[in-house]
Image (cartoon, helix red, strand yellow):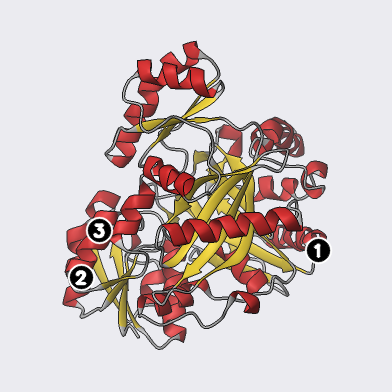
Amino acid sequence: MLKRILVANRGEIAARILRACREMNIETVAVFSEADRDSLFTTLATQAVCIGEASSNESYLNQDAIIAAALYTNCDGIHPGFGFLSENAGFAERVRDAGLSFVGPTPEVIALLGNKDAARSLMHSSGVPVVPGSEGLVATVTQAREAAECIGYPVLIKAASGGGGRGMRRANNAEELERVWAEAVAEAKACFGDGSVYLEKLIGSPRHIEVQILADTHGNCLHLGERDCSLQRNHQKMLEEAPATALTDELRERMTAAALSAARAAHYTNAGTVEFIVDGSGNFYFIEMNTRIQVEHPVTEMVTGVNIVREQIRIASGLPLQFTQEDIRIRGHAIECRINAENPEEGFLPCPGAIDHLHLPSGFGIRVDTVIHPGYVVSPFYDSMIAKIVVHGRNRNEAILRMRRALEETLITGVTTTVRLHYLLMYNPNFISNRVDTTFLESNLDELLATVKSEKGL
C-alpha cells in the first residue's frame, strides 16, 4: 500500500482525495499556489508545500515543482485529481521515471486514449460503435470539405488531443466549415499544444451517457453503472445523474458491455470513464474515454456505495479489486449540481471575489463537496466551480425533491452563482419528465433567465 501521496490539485477534489487518504491511514502532501495559501484543502494534509505563483503554469501545471515536492517530502505516489495534469501522459511518465506511483492509468494508455482519433480507431477495431467520421486526421480545409461531403452535414470539427468542448466547432454546410476551420485548429493548438483535428458526424439532440470503469493490474475489470450527463452548456456539464433512467435494460446492458470492451481493448487500469452519445432511436456511439476521475463521480458513489478514490489508490498500490461485477448493486437515484461562481444573465461570466455569507445544505441524503467558507476568495486564476451539491433518493422524483430542498437551503453571497438556475431546472416540466438532451439547457436558457429577471422585477 502507498504510504504517502502528494495530491497534485486544488480545491474540492484535492480535499476529496486527502480525506480518502486520511481514512486509509495514508500520509499526504498538498501542493498549493500563492493564491491558495490559506485554502482549506491545505490544512487537511499531513504537510503542505507552496509550488509557485497564482498562475496555473507556474504552479499546478509546473511538473518540475510538483515532482520535486514529492521527492523532497518522501512521497511514493502522486494523485492528479481531474483537470490540470491528470491526463498528461508526459507527466505520468515523469512520475514513473522518478520512481513514484501515478494514481491513474499508465502513460502509454493515457497517450493512446488522449488522442481521440487513435482512440476511435481502437474502438472501431474492437467492435465498439463509434460516431461516423473522417478516416484519420484532416490536415487542411480542403480535406475537411471532402470528408464532410462523405460523412454528410452537419459535422463537428474536433481536436484530436482535446476534450471539454475545446477545439470543437459545428459546421452545418461547406461555407460554415470554411469559416470555423481555422478557429478550431487555432483553439486546439492553444489549449492542447496540438492543432490536429478530425471530423465527426453531428448526432442531432443526443443524450450524453458515460459508464464508470474500474480495472486493476490483476486482470479484473468491472463497471459501476452509468451516468446521464446531458445537461450541458457549450459542451460543459452542469448537472449529472445516476443511473440514466431513460435507458432500457437492454440498452444499458449493451452499453456497459461496450464500455468494458473499450477498457479491455486499451489494457486499461485504475478508474476511467467511457463516454457515449445516444440518439433518439437508441443507437449509441463511443466519443472518448477519460483517463482520470470525473467531476461527477459522487453520483456513482451515492448509488453504489463504492468509494472510487479509495479504489484508485488500492489499484495504484497493486492490490486487486475488493468486489466482482455481481457485487455491484445500483440503489436509488442521485443528482449532482455543479455550483459555479458565474452570472448566467451575463453569458455565464465568471464572478471572482470574496464570499461574504455562506450556508450549505445538509440533512438526510445530501452531500456537498467544497472548500468554500465565509471570507473565501474565489480566484480569477482557476475554474469557476466552487461546490458540488449531490443528493440521493429512492428514485428520481425523490432525488429532485431533495435537490429542491438542498438548493433552497444554499446561501452564497458576495459572488454571483448558478444556484438559482439549478433551482429553476428542478421545476422545469421537461426536466422533471426526463425529456432532455445535450441541447436542452441552451434551448431553454432564455425562458429560465426570464424567470430570474421577473423575480428581480426587471
Q: Nearer the viewer, mark 2 or mark 3?
A: 3
Q: Quadrant of residue 105?
A: bottom left
* Kind of residue sitting beneath label 2: Ala
Q: Which residue is mark 3?
A: 91
Q: Residues within 10 Å of mark 3 (few under 14, many from 20)?
A: many
Q: Which residue is mark 1?
A: 398
Disc 3 is placed on an element classified as helix
Q: In this orientation, which residue lies closer to the viewer: 184 or 37?
A: 184
> Which quadrant is home to the N terminus?
bottom left
* Count of labels in the image: 3
* Kind of residue sitting beneath label 3: Phe
The numbered mark, 2 or 3, whose residue comes first in the sequence reads 2
Q: Residues within 10 Å of mark 2 (few under 14, many from 20)?
A: many
Q: Quadrant of residue 3?
A: bottom left
Q: Position of residue 38 (x, y in %)?
A: 36, 67
Q: Nearer the viewer, mark 3 or mark 1?
A: 3
User: What residue is rendered at 37% in x and 33% in y?
Assistant: 136
Q: Which residue is mark 2?
A: 69
Disc 2 is placed on an element classified as helix
User: What residue is rendered at 32% in x and 33% in y?
Assistant: 196
Seen in the image, is 162 located left or right of residue 242? left
User: What residue is rendered at 47% in x and 60% in y?
Assistant: 263
> Label 2 vs label 3: CA separation?
14 Å
Q: Position of residue 66 (x, y in %)?
A: 23, 64
> Label 2 vs label 1: CA separation?
46 Å
Q: Quadrant of residue 409?
A: bottom right
User: What residue is rendered at 17% in x and 67% in y?
Assistant: 97
Can see residue 303? yes
> Which quadrant is home to the C terminus?
top right
Q: Position of residue 331 (x, y in %)?
A: 72, 72
Q: Of the numbered discs in the image, which one, if any, rests on residue 427?
A: none
